[in-house]
Amino acid sequence: MWLNKKDRLLNNNQKGVILLLTVFIIFFMSVFIVGYLEIAATETEIMRNHRGSTQALYIADAGIEDALWQLRQNRKWKKGFKNKVFPSGESSSYTVTINNKGYPSVIIASTGTAPGNYQRQVEMGITITSTSAPCNLVVNYWKEI
């Protein structure tokens, strides 16, 4: 079968259209894949930040609990903690300050630091209701700072 000149010309034009269509499909698939990878990377970063922030909050709360234990043993305790290592096996710590100037009302502030240098702060107001050890403590408030 011999193709005449007109049929050969039409056949060559069709090959060009298919090539152009293939290039456009590859381009749009590439844009879609790059967009998907960007969203996945962003979601991973959000998850990492949430985890670190939540760990820091729990570490700060552990500092409050440690301070409450100290106050139950000695109602006049006001030393606090400076970068006390949190026993998690990672670089975690908490710093606690005690403000007992309005005794028997005491304010405890704690800053928790989680791996990745995430930090959160909490504060608790308590009232000491007995003078003998272990002291009775009444929680007035607990809040994030």
Image (spheres, rainbow, N blue to C red):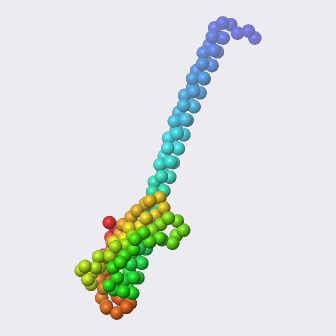
Apparent side of residue 28 relative to residue 145 in the rendered image (left or right): right
Residue most extreme to the top: 5
Q: Mark yes or no: residue 50 visible.
A: no
The relative height of residue 70 versus residue 11 in the rendered view (above or below) is below
Front-most of 12 and 99? 99
Q: Kindly identify the residue that appears in the image at 64 percent across and 15 percent down.
A: 11
The relative height of residue 136 versus residue 56 in the rendered view (above or below) is below
Position of the N terminus, as image quadrant, is: top right
The image shows a total of numbered marks equal to 0
Q: Kindly identify the residue that appears in the image at 48 percent across and 52 percent down.
A: 45
Q: Residue 99: percent from the left, percent from the top?
A: 29, 76
Residue most extreme to the right: 1
Which quadrant of the view contains residue 97? bottom left
Position of the C terminus, as image quadrant, is: bottom left
Q: Kindly identify the residue that appears in the image at 39 percent across and 74 percent down.
A: 81
Q: Residue 26: percent from the left, percent from the top?
A: 57, 31
